[in-house]
Image (spheres, rainbow, N blue to C red):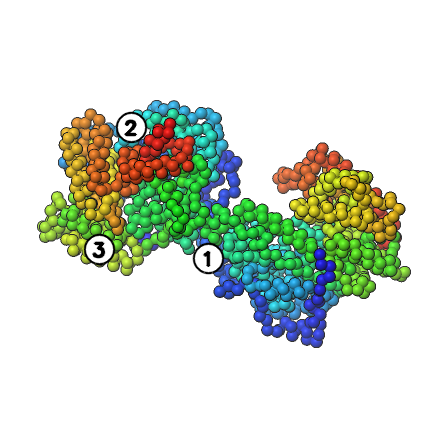
Amino acid sequence: MENKIEFKDILLPRDTHFGIVKFMTRSWSPKKTLNLDKEYLPQDIKDLVLKSTYLDSILDAECVRNGVSKHQLRKEVVNYVEEIAMDKRMHVIRWMGVFFLKVSFMMKIGIFVNEPAVLKLKETMGENPVLFLPTHRSYADFCLMTYLCYHYDIELPAVAAGMDFYTMAVVGQMMRETGAFYMRRTLAGAPLYSATLRHYVRTLVGHYGAPVEFFLEGTRSRSNKSLSPKYGMLAMTLLPYFAREVDDITIVPVNISYDRVMEQSLFAYEHLGVPKPKETTGGLIKALHTLNDNFGDIYINLGSPMSIKEYLGHPELSAETLKPRDLQKLTDEQMTHVQKLADHVVTLQQDCTVVTITNLLCIVLMDSLYRNKVLCLQEVESQIGWLIKVLRSLGANVFERDVKSGIERVLTVHRSMMRLDKEKRLRLVSSALMNMTNDVQRKMKGHILKAETMVNAVPIIQVQLYINPVLHYCVPSALVYLIASRGNILKAELYTEYTLFRKLLKHEFFHLEGIEEANFNKALEYCVHNGVLSSSGDVLANRSGDKLHNRSGDELHFLLQWAVIPALTTLFACAEVMRECKKCEHKRALKRVQEITELRKCHPYCLSLDAISNCLQGLVHAEALLKYKVKNDMIYEVVPAVMDRCHHLISSIIPKLRLVFDDSNPVIVHQKQRARL
Amino acid sequence: MTENVALLRTTTEPVPRKKNLSEKNIKKSPYDTAIKVKSAIPRKRQDLLKWYGWGYKDSMFKLKDQVATFTGTRYLIGGKSLPHFVQWVREKFDVDISKPPKIPPTPTVYPESRLPKEVREELEKVTLVSVDGMDRLIRAHGQTLNDMTHLRNNSFQRVPDAVIWPESHEQVQQIVNCATKYKFVLIPFGGGTSVSGSITCPAHETRPIVALDTSDMNSILWLDREQLLARVQAGIVGQDLEREMRARGFTVGHEPDSYEFSTLGGWVATRASGMKKNTYGNIEDLIVQTKVVTPKGVIEKSCCVPRMSCGPDWEHIVMGSEGCLGVVTEVTLKIRPLPSIVRYGSLVFPDWESGFHFEREVARQRLQPSSIRLMDNEQFRFGHALKMETSWGGVLLDGLKKLYITKIKGFDPLKLCVVTLLMEGNLEQVTERETQLNNIAARFGGIPGGAKNGEIGYTLTFVIAYIRDLALEYNIVAESFETSVPWERTLTLCRNTKRRVITECRKRNVTHYLISCRLTQTYDAGCCIYFYFGFNSAGCADALRTYEEIEEAARDEIIACGGSISHHHGVGKLRKKWYTQTVSETGRRLLFAAKQALDPDNIFALANMELDRGLVSKL
C-alpha cells in the first residue's frame, strides 16, 4: 500500500488578483471520454431516448396493460425525459464556477487532489465511457468532481442527483445545466418512469462524451462510514457494456474526505432522531452565511481506474442477445456480477480513504475521553505521531504535511467541537443546552432524549463521525483481539467467532464476506506481530499480562479495546431489547434501544438510530432475528436459540471499561449559553 | 383499390391479471415489453366455431326454397343470396336438395378420460386443464375428410384425455418434463386446420394423450419498428397476429387460406405457404429465429441473424416437423410496413394453356405481384355460381362483359380461364406492375377482366372451405389436395391427374363429380397446383374409402408426373405412403435419428411421416 501520496491544492492558484474571473472566463476545450464519429449533445441524447425501440415497445405494452392511448403515454415519457435529462450551458457553468470559487474562499477551504492519478486517467480517456464513483459524505460532493474536471480540462461529468435538488427553485435548473440529471429514489410502481430512466442512463453512458458520476451508496452517509451500495444505478450504467454497445467501461473509485463536513452537526442531530430539514433554495441562501468560517481541507483521492472488461471478463452469450439490442436487459447472472462489482468498488473507495489530522486528533480526543484523562498538547502531538505509525502499518494512507501546524489548523476549523484550554490541554466542548421545543420533540423519530443527554451526545457523536472513516482499518484486528482476550482460544474457533461478529456488524462496518479469511489472517498476524496477542501453536492469548510490554503496546491494547465499543454496545443493547420483547416493530425497537442506552449512560454513539438500525440488520443477517413486513411495518422476531448465543458472545467480549460521558469526565468543558435548535 | 389509411383499431384490451392460477407461477418474465393479445378465438372454441365442420358457427351455406344463401356477416357474400348456385349444384352433382340436410347431432357420450389423477394434479400446478368431452373431441382432429367423417359419426378411436393451455415457454418446458416423467403423449394443437391428418389422435396409442392447446401463448413479446422484426409467442392465431400488426402499421403478410384459424406455430410445423408469398415469402423466409421445447431440451440458435453458414440449419428440422419433435414456443418474424395501396385485378384467357404460359412468363421475368393465381374453367364456373345477386346495373354490366368476352373476343365459355391478381405497393409501383402484367397477358391472348372479379376471387378463397360442410350434408364428399411441380411438367401433370381421377370415378360407378385445378403459386423453378375433387357419394357403400382410394390414385399419378408429395399441406398421416420415396431411405433414417435425439420416448407420438415405422422396427 502506498503511504505517501502527492496531493496538490487546486484552489491555491486561483487565490490571486482576478484569479477567479480569469480562470472562469478562459477558453475551455475539455477532453472527452468517448470519441465517437458523431458527437452527441445533451439534446441528441434526449432524442435518441425518445425514439428508441425500447421505449416504443414499452409504450405499446403499457397501452395494452392499462388502456391509455399511446399518444398520451408518449407525452408522459417526454415529461419524464425533460425531468431527468442533463444539459450543458457554458455560461451557467462559468457563473457557477465563479460562485463556487467565491464560496470556497469564504469557507477558507483547500481542495487537495492526487494530481498524477487525474493526469494519468485523462491521458487514457477517449476510448470508452468512464464512471466516477465517489463516496458521498456531504452535499459538497456534488460540486467537487465537476470543479475538478473543469480544472483539469475534462468534460464535465453528468451527475446523478436526487429529486431534492430538482425541486429547488433556480438551483435545480442551474445544476442541470452544469450536468446534473435527476432520478427519483423509488422506481417501484412506476414502470414507465423506470423504463425511461433506465434507457436515458444507458444512452447517456453509451453516447455522451463525458464521465458519468453517481454515488454508489445512494445517499450521504450520515456516519461518515461506507454504506452498502445500491445496485440499480450501476446496473443501468453497465448495461451498454453487457449489450456490447461499448467495448469497456472504466470505473474510477473516488474518496472524498473532509476536514470538516458542512453537515456535521445536522448529521449528529439526525443520528439522535432529529429529522433533517428539507432542501430549499431559501434554506441554502440562509445557510450561506454560516459558510463564512473555516472548513479546513478537502481531499479528493482518485483510485486506480478499473476496466470492467478486465474485472468481469468478456460478457458471456445469453438469451438476451436474441432481443434487439435496445431491449436487452441484464440476466440474473449478470446482475449478480454487478452486485459483486458494486461491493468491490465500495472497498476500493475505502482503500482510497485519506486519513487527515482531523481524524487523528479526534481519535486522540476520544481516547482521552475513554481514559478520563486530559492530554496536554505535547502528549497529543506524540499520540498523533504514534497513531500515524499504527494506521500506516494497518494500511492506511495518512496525509500529513506537518503535524504541529496541522493540529493548529484543525483546532481552528473545529473550535466549536474541541479546544485547548488555558493549560494547553485538549478538551471537548459540549454543545449548548438546547431548548427542545414541543415542535422538535414531536418530529423526533426515536425516543425523546433529555436535553442534558443531547448536550454531550452531540459533540461526542461529531467526534465519532471523524473516527468512523478510519475504523475499517482496525475493526478486524480489534475483533480478533477482543475475542482472544477472553481467554485462550484455538485459531479455528477464533475464526468462527470472528466471522459471526463480522456478520453481526456487517451493516455497521461494510466489508466483503468473500475475502474475510484473508482479512482475518492479516488481523491476527498484526496482533501477534505487534505483541498484543501471543500465539503458541494454534492457541492464541492476550499478552497484556506479560511483563514485556512497553508503552506503545499498552496504547495499542487500549485502542483495540475501544475501537469497537460503540458498535458492540449498540449490538448488545439491540440483542437485549429484542430478547426482552421477542417480537416488535422496527420503530419500537429503535426507541427502546435509545431509551436503555440513555438510561445506562452508554457511549452516546449508541444512541444513533443509524447504528441501532445497522445492528438490528446485523442480527437479522446472523439469523438471530427474523424480519418480515406486516402492512407498512417492519417486524423483527427473535430466533431464541441463535439470539441467546449471540447475546452471550457479545457480552463476553465487550471490554469492561469504566466509561463516563457526562460532565464528570474531565475532558469535557462546558458551554454556558443556551441555544435553540 | 383499398387504401390502408385508417389503421384498424387494435383489440388488445387491458388484461386483468389472473389471480390464483398464475400467482404461483409469476416468475420475472424476460420480456417487459410483452403484449398479451385478446384472441378472436375464445378458449372454448366451440362457443364460436362449429364443432362438426369448418369455421364460424354463424357462417354457412344454406339452401332454402331452392335458393342458396350464405349466413352471417363475416364475409363479403354474407347474408346475400346466390341465385346461380342451386342450378350449378344440381347440374354438377345431381343432388336432391329438397331433402333435409344431414346435420349431425351434438354428441352426448365421450370416451372416458384416461388421464390419471396424479398427473392431472401435477399439470394443474402449471396450467389450466380440461377433461370436458367436447373440449377433447374438437381437439382430436384436423380438417381432412377422414376427420370430418369420424367427427360427424363420433367414431374416433381415440381422442385426447385432457386439454391444457400453457401461457409461456417456461410452462411448456415444465409440461414436457412432466410428460417425460409420467409417460403421457403430448399433441401440440394450434388452430386444428391440418389437412394431412397430422394432429389426428393416433388410434392405437395406449398412453394418456394430452392436447397442448397453444392458443394462450399469443403475446407479442417485442416489436422492433427499426429492424422490422417481431418476437411472438407461437400460439398466436393468424388473424390476431395480422390485426395487431396492422394496428401498428405493419403486416406479416403470411396468409394461408386457413389464416383465420391457424397459428404461427402450426405454420412452422407444417412449412406453411401464404397467398402473398411473392412479396412476403413463405414461412421459412419469414422466420428469423425459433425456440422449440423438445423432451431433450430447448433447441434454438443463439443469434438473431439474417443468414448463417454453420452446418445444416436445425431450424429446418423444426420446420415441417409436424408436431413430432416438440413444441414451437417463440418465433422471431420479419414484419413489413403496410403497403399504401392494395389493388385487385383479373385477366381472362381463352384457355388453361394460354393462362399457364402467361404465368410462366411472369415468373420468368420475376414480375409476380403479391399473389397471382390461374383458375381452370371448372373453377371459373364454380366462382360464377357463387356470384351474388346484383342490381340490374350490375347485371347489365356483367352481360356486356360476357358479350364482349364470348362474342367479340370469341372465347369459349366452357374453356376460358381466369387469372386473379393481388398487387401491393405505392401507387406508382402498383400501376407500373399492372401495365407490365397486362402487356404480357396480351401476348398470350389474355384481356383484363376487372378488379371486382379479382377481389371476389380472393374473398371466395376463405368461403370455399365452408362448402364442404354443406356438401357433406347432401352426401357429396369433397376435398382438396395440392402439389408442387416443375414448369415443364405442369401441363401434363394437370391433364393426367384429372384424367386419372375421372377414370377412377368411372371404375367405381361414380357418375357425378367435379375435378378442377388452379395454379396458386409460382416460383423460378415451378409452381403449385391445387386440385379440388368432389363427388356425389349416394351410390357408394363407403364414401370415405372411395374418396381415399381415388385421392391415392391421384397422388400416385402426381408423383409419377414429377410432382411432389405436398407443396404446403404437409405429409401427416395421409401421405406417409410417399414419404420415404420422396426423401430416400437414408433421408428417412435421418428423420428417425432426429426423433431419437430429440424425443426418444416418443412423447410427441403423432407418428407422422412414417415415424411410426421406425419405432415399430425398434420395438
Which callout, 1 or 3, points to the residue nearer the camera?
3
Quadrant including the C terminus of chain A:
bottom right
Pointer 2 chain:
B
Residue situated in front as seen by the camera: A271 or B496: B496
Q: What is the total number of numbered labels drawn onto the structure image?
A: 3
In the displayed structure, does residue A663 sit left or right of residue B25?
Answer: right
Mark 3 in CB contact with mark 2 (< 8 angstroms): no
In the displayed structure, does residue A421 sit left or right of residue B22?
Answer: right
Q: Residues within 10 Å of mark 2 (few under 14, many from 20)?
A: some
Residue at image coords 32%, 47%: B282
For the residues tagged 1 and 3, is the chain the same? no
For the residues tagged 2 and 1, is the chain the same? no
Residue pointed to by mark 1: A51
Q: Position of residue A521 (x, y in %)?
A: 73, 46
Residue at image coords 61%, 48%: A340
Residue at image coords 85%, 45%: A544
Residue pointed to by mark 2: B150
Residue B397 versus residue A209 in the image, above or below: above
Disc 1 and disc 3: Cα gap in Å? 41 Å
Q: Residues within 10 Å of mark 1 (few under 14, many from 20)?
A: few
Mark 2 in CB contact with mark 1 (< 8 angstroms): no
Q: Is residue B478 visible?
A: no
Whichever of callouts 3 and 2 sits on the residue coming sooner in the sequence is 2
> Label 2 is placed on what type of residue?
His
Pointer 1 chain:
A
> Label 3 is placed on what type of residue?
Leu
For the residues tagged 3 and 2, is the chain the same? yes
Residue A308 versus residue A617 in the image, above or below: below
> Label 1 is placed on what type of residue?
Lys
Quadrant including the N terminus of chain A:
bottom right
